[in-house]
Amino acid sequence: MKYISQLLSRVEAFLFMPVFFILIAGLLTMSSFEVGDTYFWKQGLFIIICLSAFFFAASFEYRFLKQTRVVIAVYTFLLSVLGLLFVLGKVSKGAQSWFHLGGFSFQPTDYMKLGLIIVLAKYFSRRHIEIANIRHIIVSGIYAFIPFVLVALQPDFGSAMVIFAIWLGMVLVSGISKKHLLLVFGIGTVAFFLAWHFAFKPYQKARIINFVDPLHDIRGTGYNAYQSTIAVGSGGVFGKGIGYGTQSRLNFLPEYKTDFIFAAYAEEWGFVGAVLLLLFYLLIMYKLASYALVADSTFEALFTYGVMIWFLTHIVINIGMNIGIMPVTGIPLPLMSYGGSHLLSECLALGMAVGMHAYARAGHKYHMKNEFLGLE
């Protein structure tokens, strides 16, 4: 009991409260309220496991992650698992992104995002003063480019874009020069041009065309996005009530438990519920930013900023595609969409950020006490 009490004291209510609310809101939104609803019970089990992982991760000190051999081992292992997908992975919805284990599926891409954050935090923590040297941008770009290619070849273009966003965001946080920033965007523009002509699948091109013109093909490739915007708009101010969303419950809105769960939630909870959800996400972002600002070292600060960038990218892309202002990609809404794989990686990342903050805070108190006693 004493250990549990100490562990709970490390996790601030202002972080745990929004995490718990979002988890439960997602669970209620995807539930059919019928006996034997497998999605509800599986997600409930995922939530229990992931909250346990969150508290478990928050109980550790992460100085060992500052060791180069540990970071390289983690990065190499995750790359190897991504490579195994092309041999042992199963194709689902056109992408070879999953390992199927009995009645459950596992997507290693989610953990590669966390691993990349660790690698980049380690790299930039030792070289952030020299970030103006373009060599460090190139080397860090190579670390991100390898998993980017492996994920894009699945093909999972949405997750590949998240990997790119994590790299770009952490480069920006580290202090890239304006000249090099323009170079990065120039390379990105050329890469997009080449990808459009040589890499994008027809359905990926169609999604981008529908992003520019949402009404281009509402009976075909634009159907999901069109139904999503209808669901969001039909929720009104206070929503139709939990379990009474017609677009989702009557199956007009596809994938309402995963990619389009925000639309299903907004239909049932309305504008007020959507604003409340965004406020809870904003509170998580605020807490992560506050942890980064008082971090014990540059590594902890960059890691926490990386987690914040990861979450923010998912939130912007997912909600953006739900309201018709972003292309449709298979990007889950953090802590809310159905699935244990992404949920576990997100809870582990948040738990690690809490653990780093807790031990930094404890170390600060220790040094303050010794200074007061004249021991330092």
Image (tube, rainbow, N blue to C red):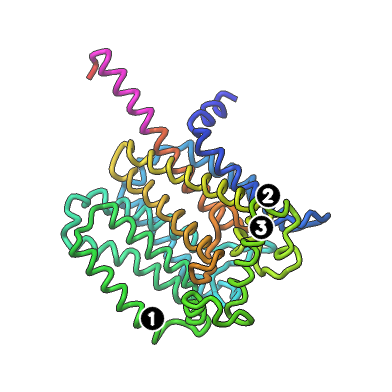
Q: CA distance from mark 3 to mark 2?
A: 29 Å
Which element is circle 1 on? Answer: helix
Residue type highlighted by circle 2: Leu
Reply above or below: 280 against 138: above
Q: Which residue occupies 53% across, 54% down?
A: 334
Left or right of 202 on screen, residue 90: right
Magenta region, residue range: 360-374
Residue type highlighted by circle 1: Ala
| Comparing labels 3 and 2, the label whose residue is closer to the camera | 3
| Comparing labels 2 and 1, the label whose residue is closer to the camera | 1
Q: CA distance from mark 3 to mark 1?
A: 38 Å
Instruction: Please rate how many residues cluster around mark 2, counting C-alpha atoms within 10 Å: few if below 14, some from 14 to 19, many from 20.
Output: few
Residue type highlighted by circle 3: Gly
Q: Which residue is mark 1?
A: 195
Residue 372 covered by magenta stretch: yes
Left or right of 310 on screen, residue 376: left
Q: Which residue is mark 2?
A: 45
Find residue 144 and report its horizontal and vertical position in percent: 35, 64
Residue 153 covered by magenta stretch: no
Instruction: Please rate how many residues cluster around mark 3, counting C-alpha atoms within 10 Å: few if below 14, some from 14 to 19, many from 20.
Output: many
Q: Which residue is mark 3?
A: 235
Which sits earlier in the primary sequence, circle 3 or circle 1? 1
Quarter of the image where the C terminus is located: top left
